[in-house]
Amino acid sequence: MRVLVTGATGFIGGHVVAALLAAGHEPVPCARDKTFGKRRLPGLEWLKIDFNTDTSVEDWLTQVQGVDAVVNCAGILQGSLGQSMAHVHRTGPIALFEACARAGVRRVVQISAIGADPNGATAFSRSKAEADEFLTGLDLDWIVLRPSLVYGAGSYGGTSLLRGLAALPVAIPLPDGGRQRFQPIHIDDLTRSILRLIEPDAPARLILEPVGSQVRSVREIVLGLRAWLGIAPAPVLALPMGVLRAFAKLGDLAGLFTGQGTLRSTALKQMELDNTAPVEPFAAAVGFTPRSFDEGLARMPSQVQDRWHARLYFLRPLILLSWVPAFFALGGIVAALTRGTDDFMVPVGIISGVFLFVLALVAAWALRSQR
Ligand SMILES: NC(=O)c1ccc[n+]([C@@H]2O[C@H](COP(=O)([O-])OP(=O)(O)OC[C@H]3O[C@@H](n4cnc5c(N)ncnc54)[C@H](OP(=O)(O)O)[C@@H]3O)[C@@H](O)[C@H]2O)c1
């Protein structure tokens, strides 16, 4: 089957493309940055798309020509100056779905999110629900998948944050001690279900909640990931939600300009929902029961790259900005050589140099594992 996949450079979309290839299908991956995709999978015909701008049916009619099914895996957690949540989750996908209806592409799988709700507390939840509602009103063989937390080989966004927390030294601070509940589903179970659901004879016109067969609190997930990474146990510290909400506001501000960052208000609000559901309806529709979180980790040994990434997670912003203290340290040296050691830039340079030294030590600690 020829299957158009949006969000093909992302975590879920990338795995969907890989699973389609493994099953002998012909994926048509779509990305905003086609060059990046083409470098990774040069054998495929990549399409350049952007839900911010491709908001009319006409934008999609040629893209869906000759396609047997569409899997929409594109999404963002929160809007930014360059990314409109309304377009990425609602206007763009609605135009794509309408184009499918006009072009006769009957199978459409929409990756929504657990808790999607037209009256939800976040723009994320509302915009997802609005696109789902539009799709379910079309005369197509649609499937809406609303997964709980998805994990697997590699990590993006929220799962990277969980891995970063799991690898912290000394103690692990978690919102409210990590009492929030998820039902993590392994990416291989999600892609297996998508492969089943794109088949012409598969069940259709269903809203399903892909979940794993084990409810896990954030605390259990993070401690499970820590053990999976092979890091010695550490105590959990309960962080008051109020403090985190204040940090998230800063994250929102930074994310507005950079379009990046996971500690943002939407993530916190989504986390506070009960991200669990009965596994039986999903299992019945796809013909298998997804593995538990414990099984998922046990069948996926962690690698040295996982340890490096997890330990460097919170250092990344400091390393990215390390050119600032480096600039002041150099300024201090130049000032000492040209204007003498009494110049005000000299202590600034020394403090910057000490900061860089400590950062280098911590980075060396983070990268010490060779296995
Ligand atoms: N991962 C989970 O645990 C989880 C759980 C429930 C639901 N979901 C939903 O599943 C979907 C995929 O999640 P993910 O974890 O794979 O996220 P991800 O790794 O961040 O990938 C998101 C994808 O969406 C693409 N995208 C972003 N803005 C776009 C735009 N304007 N036009 C077209 N494509 C755009 C990204 O492409 P670029 O490379 O161009 O940015 C990327 O390929 C999201 O809608 C998410 O809400 C995920």
Image: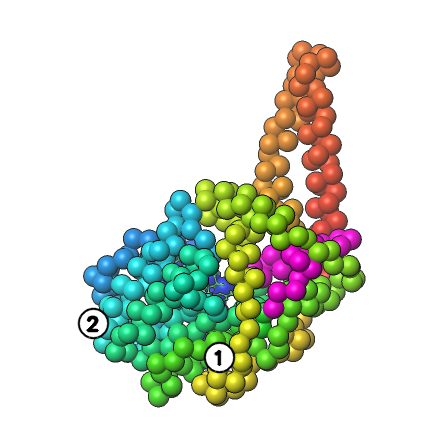
In this picture, is 105 found above or below 201?
Answer: above
Residue 295 lies in quadrant: bottom right
Residue in view at x 36 percent, y 83 percent: 204
Q: Nearer the viewer, residue 19 or 251?
A: 251
Report whether the residue tagged 1 is closer than 8 Å to ligand 1.
no
Magenta stretch encompasses residue 252: no
Which of pointers 2 and 1 indicates the residue nearer the eye? 2
Q: Which span is picked out in magenta? A: 155-181
What separation in Å lies between label 2 and label 1 (alpha carbons)? 28 Å
Can residue 35 be seen at all in this image of the molecule?
A: no
Residue in view at x 71 percent, y 21 percent: 347
Amino acid bearing label 2:
Arg
* Residue that numbered label 2 is attached to: 102
Magenta stretch encompasses residue 177: yes
Mark sitting earlier along the chain (2/1): 2
Res 192 label: 1
Quarter of the image for the C terminus: give it: bottom right
Residue 276 lies in quadrant: bottom right
